[in-house]
Image: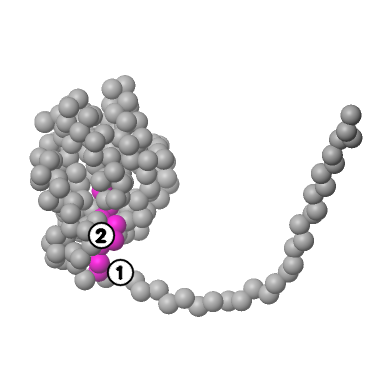
Amino acid sequence: MAAPVRVLFAAPQFTTAKRHRMTVALTPNPPGGPSASALWSALRDAGTSHVVTVPDFVQFALHDKLRNAGEGMQQIFACSEDQALTTATGLYIGGASPVLMMQNQGFYKCLNTLRATCIDASVPMVFLVGQFGREIENFGAPARRSRRSVVWMIEPLLEAIGVRYWNVDEDEHVKRCAEAFAHAKATEGPAVVLIGRHVTWN
């Protein structure tokens, strides 16, 4: 009988290096964009119980607001947009009032799940979709004029499948969220709020 093999692991060797300070010049976004506080209030006023999300960089400030706002809405993180939508559907069936929050890229990914749940099964659902990749030069202009397909394709796509959408690029547009919630409830289907600019930290 062969003797057991002993495997020895050498302890890692760490070296100490000097830390160098680096100065990074950041280019701020132009003034404008919907505020996290206004969007949070719109969700609260609509009776939202849960925000199911695959985190979106465009709406990062709203994620932070949801995390720090205390009791009220629960933020649930999903691994994919399909999982987020099916989770939200389960919450709705169970009597909750969920909202979905995702990036434009992920919205494209979950279209078949949207068809099955919101269109075929008549599940009312509001999607907050961040327009990731939109150029600063495109702010204030129609998103269809963006040079990036991930941005300009979404509106024609929604029109092609018969899903209504609302553009929210500024604080003054946030009131459109109420229209989206009313539409989803009245039609028992999907409604999409396109967040066209980075949400501001206030």
- Residue 91: percent from left, percent from top: 32, 27
Residue under the image location 17 percent in, 40 percent down: 191
92 left or right of 158 in image: right
**Residue under numbered circle 1:** 29
Q: Nearer the viewer, residue 65 or 13?
A: 13
* Residue 67 position by quadrant: top left
Q: Is residue 54 left or right of residue 39?
A: right
Q: Is residue 35 above or below residue 179?
A: below
First-in-chain label (2 vs 1) = 1
Q: How far across and down, in percent of the image, does residue 49 sit?
A: 32, 33
The answer to whether residue 74 shows anywhere in this view is: yes
Image check: 56 left or right of 185? right
Which residue is pictured at 32% across the width and 53% down the height?
A: 59
Checking the image for residue 197, the label placed there is 2
Q: Which residues are magenta?
A: 128-136
Q: Percent x, y for residue 183?
A: 12, 36
Q: Is residue 72 visible?
A: no
